[in-house]
Image (cartoon, helix red, strand yellow):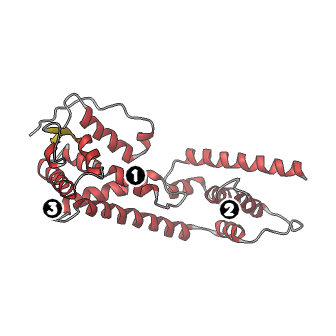
Amino acid sequence: MHHHQAHRPAPRSHDSLRSPLGELEQAFLALARGIEPLTFPAHLVCDDPDRAAWTVDQVRTHLAHPSTRAELREQTWREVVRRARDLGEPWGVVAVAMTVPVLRRMLARLPRPAHMERAEVEQEALAAVAVALRTVDLRSERLDRELFNAADRAVHRVVYAAHRRANREAGPATARLDLLCASPQADPDEAVDEFTVLAQAVKARVVDVAEARLIARTRLGGEPMSLLAAERGVSVRQLYRHRNAAEQHLAAHLRNRLQEV
């Protein structure tokens, strides 16, 4: 069995600092490409390997290759999960990181609320995989699918809860804005108020719905920025920057419309 020695982690990119998947990927690659790389028996994942042991990132790449037989894929996953349970770290990191390519594709297709941070969804997916690693039956067929299904259920639960929470917390300002956004184009001769201006800006794709709601709730509805920051899981400072950028786009749009009159 290969003994892994401690080494200095690879430098982390700026993007990885905002992404749990990115953080995990950096830790995984550090294990695979460090001074003494963490390896795995190559015959478990390949019928005719070029060497006795492959680094764990090579194993992951081969696992995803269409030419890899299902039997090899099964026995590789079974051994990775067994090591995570019996040997502990760093195999726990390796086992969860083996799911990262599939999780990235899964989350890219996931429709999440505009106010919901990507990092929150990624963390839910990883936590679900970590739990499933401890509970999945090692004799299961397509053991990897059990892990992916656990992640899929977890992220859909958290997204559904976020939608429910957003609907429950929406006040009169949001309700009025949403109604105007869903209404047909107003008569140009009708009196226009701030909500109508925001709704028209959404329809013109000057701002998106989340930005319009932010402006409506804080500028027109008087709700504190701290409340919305807590709802959206971001800092107050970040939310102020977001609102300022949206208001600049809105102001430029209104100036252009005035010049056209």
Determine which of the numbered discs, if any, sits on residue 30 in the image: none
Amino acid at dot 1 = Arg
Give x and y (percent) for residue 220.
71, 60
The amino acid sitting under disc 3 is Leu
Residue 138, numbered circle: 3
The answer to whether the residues at label 2 and label 1 have Cβ atoms under 8 Å apart is no
The circle on residue 221 is 2
Check disc 2 and report its element: helix, strand or loop. Answer: loop
Q: In this view, does 207 lie to the left or right of 77?
A: right
SS of the residue under disc 1: helix
Residue 33 at x, y percent in the picture? 26, 33
CA–CA distance in space, label 2 to label 1? 38 Å
Query: Mark 2 or mark 1: which comes first in sequence?
Result: 1
Asked whether 5 or 177 is in front, the reply is 5
**In contact (CB < 8 Å): disc 1 and disc 3:** no
Q: What residue lies at 35% left-to-right and 54% top-to-bottom?
A: 102
Label 1 – label 3 distance at C-alpha: 24 Å
Q: Separation of disc 3 and disc 2 at Cα?
A: 55 Å
Mark 1, residue position: 104
Give the structural element (helix, strand or loop) at label 3: loop
Point out the frontmost of discs 3 and 2.
3
Residue density around tag 2, few if under 14, some if 14–19, many if 20 or more, within 10 Å: some
